[in-house]
Amino acid sequence: MSQSEGKLWAIVLAGGEGVGLRALTRQLYGEERPKQYAVLTGSKCLLRQTLERVALLVPPNRTVVVTLASHARYLAAERPALAEVTVLAQPADRGTAAGVLLAAHWIAARDPEATVTAFPTDHFIVDETVFMRDVAEVAAYVRTDPERLVLFGATPTGPDPGYGWIECGERVGWAGFGPIHRIRDFREKPSPDVARRLFTLGYLWNTFIFAIGLRALIEAGRQCIPLLHDRLVRLGVFAGTQYESWAMRQAYLLAPAADFSRAVLESSSLSLAVAPIPASTWFDLGTPERVARILGRSGAPAPSWLGRLRPSA
């Protein structure tokens, strides 16, 4: 690697409140615990599973977890898994755009030429070693084309309107495990009727796992959400100082809320591409119904609550 090339970093998004799984976490824990701190498969919470998966490719000292300050008591229970990673505790929830871009600006203050990968915490991956090898190949492709954001797209199993939907265009590259296509169309959480049409047209589901050059990511934030960018870019002045936490609180006071998929991915400010993966590789754990269906299909260890949950058809 040349002196001018940055390293590979990971952003782990753990700042949501997990509204879609509140009924389930209330049943499991007697409280509306955010899903990333819940044990749904195996013996570890989703956040810890994600960190262990990411560590197969990116070392903990280049992993940034974005969460909320209000989650402090849940984070404390996961302290051993967080010992070497950086945790950015947002003062308030300003949406996924703030989560992604806060981490991007933090990384930029330390490694401005970095390539970044992003991972939600509500996923189940069947073969993590193989999947992270695929992520490594996509990151290597992005290093040659850092202006392009490459999403992983899963083959849909039905017309679920709760996902983002991706139409593949022409092939623009190769990632070893398969082709990378230009994204011709991106639809975030369409109506049920539109989702049925996109399903029949062969669109893919957006997994929200992606790789991109850091500079391009920050520039996309500047173009698509300038008010949020203006609040976050000021944090670089305070990076590594005793005023960093204070500066973050000030930045979030007037920062607008924005969804990354709607504000950035649906815009024309980024060159988007998709790397298709089989439906049997990746599973979303965003609702109780998905969790129940997925556990039955994936072969994951069945937790005790599964028998009490009645998934919808």
Image (cartoon, grey):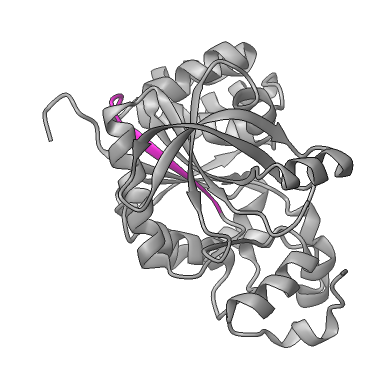
Q: Main secondary structure of the magenta part?
A: strand
The answer to whether residue 112 is seen in the rendering is yes
Examine the rendered structure and indicate whether residue 307 appears above or below residue 86.
Answer: below
Residue 128: percent from the left, percent from the top? 42, 66
Residue 270, magenta (yes or no): no
Q: Quadrant of residue 165?
A: top right
Residue 71: x and y in percent read: 64, 53
Left or right, 290 with respect to 126, comes to right
**In the rendered image, which quarter contains the C terminus?**
bottom right
Residue that lies at the very extreme toward the left in this rendered image: 2
Question: Which residue is at a point 62% across and 58% down the rendered structure image?
Answer: 122
Of residue 278 and residue 114, the one placed in the foreground of this image is 278
Report the magenta residues as a range.
112-120
> Residue 164, relative to residue 144: is it above or below?
below
- Give me the residue at 28% from left, 32% from top: 143
**Which x, y percent locates residue 34?**
70, 58
Q: Is residue 119 magenta?
A: yes
